[in-house]
Image (tube, rainbow, N blue to C red):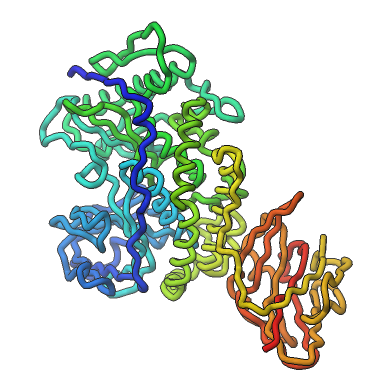
Amino acid sequence: MNLQFEERELETLKADGDYTFEPIFSESLPTISIVSEDGKNDFVTQPNRTEKWDYTKCTVSITGCEDKYLMSEVSAGVKVRGNYTANYDKKPLRIKFDKKQAMLGLNHGIKQKSWVLLAEVKDQSLLRNLSAFYLGHRILGSDGYYVTDFRPVRVEINGQFWGVYLLVEQQENKDGRVNVPNAEEGYTGNDIGYFAEYDGYYSEEGPDGDPTFELNYHNWGEMNGPNGKVWPSQQGYTLKSDIYDPKQADYAGKFLECVYDVAYEATKGKYYDINPSGVSLARVTGNVEIAKHINKYIDLNSLVDTYLLQEITCDPDIGWSSFYLDFDLTDGADHRVRFEAPWDYDSALGNKAGFCEDGDGYYAYGSSNPWLTLLTGQSFFQEMVQAKWAKLVETDSFSSLFSWIHRYSDTYEEEYAENYTRWPGHLGYNHQTAGELREDTRNCASQKQCASMVSDWLGDRLTYLSRKYGNSEEVRYAPSAKPTLPQGYESVAYEAEGLSLFGRAGIANKAGASGGKVVTLEHASSGIRIENEGSEEREVYLSLVLPSQINTADISPRYEVRVGGTPIDIGTPMLQRRKGSSSAYAEAIIANPIDLPEGSTTIEIRGLGKAFDIDQIRLYSKTK
């Protein structure tokens, strides 16, 4: 085998691709029906992480969708997939058709045998993978790299509703997916395509599993992140490509190790080329441009895109598993390592306890993933990230995601509620996931509240990163559109700085009292009482101005609003982030208006045992 590596001009690192990706969307969720040959559900209830079953014969049908996507009793196999998620009662599934099939228009109607249904047990919003894949298409897909398409669906098994799942593509090197060739059956040469996962579970594969290899990071413990030295979490990789000789896996590991060493040594000012054999290095002398040199062996554009997606989403798994790369060593290919096929974000976007919960700070840069830490401190790499960020801002790639989050949550509200009727123990405190997830997730009372939490977190995360990559121009990303009320509402504000429902504090009327006035503040059992003394009927929106770290998912379980002594449904509040000269705060406007009759009416805000400080109370009021 005689590899040739070509130099590439720096301009090729700044691709200007297609940023127009939008997901397929319908006003109701399609239903995928799986009927097993024996009519039993054992295949979806009994397997677990270490004892997965082989495929169970079944038929697959699709209803409730556009006519062109309908499917009727197509022969397939189905099995539980995943690692730790296979232990949950609602399990992820892999469908493998007997013959290639398109599914619900994904990936331009491509026909493949294998498809995946993600169960999303850890993610109570059911939107985190979807959001990450959307950003993946805008970031990596715009430069031509592969990202799975997706569509939320209802799943029925043997006639029983099994929940809302996310239909996605199998991570594999096939035409239209990861674009590296599989070896022909029986071929034992090394000049083939390799698709590999950085996989903390590689040691569990065993003799009948996928082939594996390890990398010996010669600089173990010497990678420098923003806060000092970072150690790789693990060394193992699992090959997802077809190979027919264990020596092919060994070669893949040696080649990848050489690529890593070339890049690492370049950051230290030492330059090496990979010899034609692909498994040894030769020292380079003379003037060398670091970016151009590394780009001979690593598709830097793909690494920049992957880094940026991981830095935004703060995926806890990136130092452990579900991180993919590929390289094509066939004749005529460029032989570079390429990063694509992002995967597994149900713990990301602020969901897992202790992992970037507030959306601040570098994350991927300081992770234990050796590839993401390798180059991120280099000035040329940071310049490339900034250039990509500017393009994403210009194309509204970030802002559009918020609209999609709210669109999914609003349109499929009934289907999401149906999911949690089927799996009531999965919403709020779930004994299967409680040890992993942050407190706010464990307190969620509905999918919509969880969706608001995702949206709020993304707003904070993108705002933080805009200060790092937006050329010093900060952009405040609103997690939802600024609340707009109909014309004719009067705003009455009451200062309540430092007010707690668990004690007493001063409160003052800032404006005229046409919308009501505060008459007293009592102990937490009575809460805050706002008494309307209008001479006419009025419609009022109540607003609580809260510290900036609060999100709308917190409000319903922490506060109760009563009008004339009767509790009202406050819905999921509209959230407006504001930033003052010295501190940020959030205005949560109760989604449902309050009808106040003529005369004296009392509005009470009561704490439910978990209340937090309120900075201000507002009433938006108009005559009916």
Nearest to the observer: residue 591 or residue 7: 7
Nearest to the observer: residue 172 or residue 163: 172
At x 66% / y 67%, what residue is drawn? 588
Expressed as whole percent of the image width and height from the top left, the position of residue 336 reads 30, 27
Expressed as whole percent of the image width and height from the top left, the position of residue 108 reads 24, 56
The quarter of the picture where residue 542 lies is: bottom right
In this picture, residue 90 sits left or right of residue 107: right
Quadrant where the C terminus sits is: bottom right
In this picture, residue 606 sits left or right of residue 374: right
Q: Check the image and report above or below for 136 versus 65.
A: above
Is residue 608 shown to the viewer in this render? yes
At x 61% / y 30%, what residue is drawn? 227
Q: Check the image and report above or below for 505 versus 269.
A: below
Is residue 46 shown to the viewer in this render? no
The quarter of the picture where residue 484 lies is: bottom right
Nearest to the observer: residue 533 or residue 259: 533
Q: Tell which residue pokes out farthest to the front in this image.
A: 487
Quadrant where the N terminus sits is: top left
At x 13% / y 56%, what residue is drawn? 99
At x 16% / y 32%, what residue is drawn? 244
Q: Check the image and report above or below for 289 versus 47.
A: above
Expressed as whole percent of the image width and height from the top left, the position of residue 238 reads 32, 36
